Image: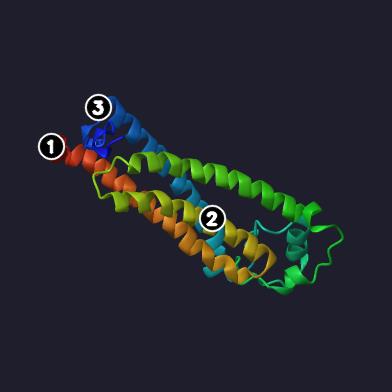
Amino acid sequence: MSRNNIPGRNQKWPTLAQLPVPAKALVSIVILTMAFAMLGALGQIIVHDIIPTFFSSQPSGHRDYSETSEQHESKESDSAASDRGDLFAEESSRAEAPEKQPLHQTEQFVWMLKWTHIHLFGMNMIFIFMGAITIFLNISTRARTWLVILPFIGVLVDIAAMWLKGYISPAFFWLHIPGGGLFGIVFAIVSVRAFWEMYSARKNYAQH
């Protein structure tokens, strides 16, 4: 079969500016809803990670979500504890506790598995929706492809940071920055570009 006979080969891919009003309304509400979710996640990071890590000189009740409730209680009851968030946590606090159960039966491991699959489903669904919007942006194919892929890489890095800081070293706390930053920046780029194409530049693209 000739390549020239493939249906739709020479048809131009539609852009957001060319979508009907109901479709634009759907895209807009999806972006706004996801934006509120991202702001909530950012607020949680500020309250539970950044402030206790960098701005608190006393233990603030912040809990490292990768530790068990028993480990958390023992840290609170230890008068010598001086943890300031994940970054300055003592590595020995994880290493000194003897394991009484196989790893797969510990509360920490079970909690981490639960957190991981919930986080994967939730974050990936956000960027599945955002990816569907991205493919209609009026930019190059290469740019759209990277904007679709990069957020999923960021999510995987963010999840890896939780496991690494929980079982290897608190220093892996820093992986949250490139991981979360990657999908956060891409989300912002796609959102701003989508609104601009739909409502500010629609006259320029509608005829193309």
SS of the residue under disc 2: helix
Mark toward the start of the polypeptide (3 vs 2): 3
Please state if 87 lies on the left or on the right of 15 as rendered: right
Tell me the quadrant of the picture where the N terminus can be found: top left
Q: How far apart, in angstroms, are the residues tagged by discs 1 and 3? A: 13 Å
Marks 3 and 2 sit apart, C-alpha to C-alpha, by 35 Å
Q: Tell me where residue 58 appears, x and y as whole percent.
A: 62, 69
Mark 2 residue type: Leu
Q: Amino acid at mark 1?
A: Lys
Q: Is residue 87 visible?
A: no
Secondary structure at numbered mark 1: helix
Which residue position holds label 2? 156
Q: Which residue is mark 1?
A: 203
The 10 Å Cα crowd at callout 3, few under 14, some 14 to 19, many 20 or more, is few
| Residue situated in front as seen by the camera: 71 or 52 | 71
Amino acid type, label 3: Pro
Q: Position of residue 103 (x, y in %)?
A: 79, 58
The residue shown at (44%, 48%) is: 39
- Tell me which label, 2 or 1, sits earlier in the chain: 2
* Foreground residue among 181 and 58: 181
Give percent across and percent down for residue 203: 13, 37
User: Which image quadrant: the C terminus?
Assistant: top left
**Count of marks, rendered view:** 3
Q: Secondary structure at mark 3?
A: loop
Residue denoted by label 3: 20
Residue drawn at (83%, 63%) of the image = 99
Q: Residue at x 56, y 47 (%)?
A: 120
- Mark 2 packing: few (<14 Cα in 10 Å), some, or many (20+)? some
**Residue contact between numbered discs 1 and 3, judged by CB atoms under 8 Å:** no
Within the image, what quadrant is residue 77 found in? bottom right
Q: CA distance from mark 2 to mark 1?
A: 39 Å
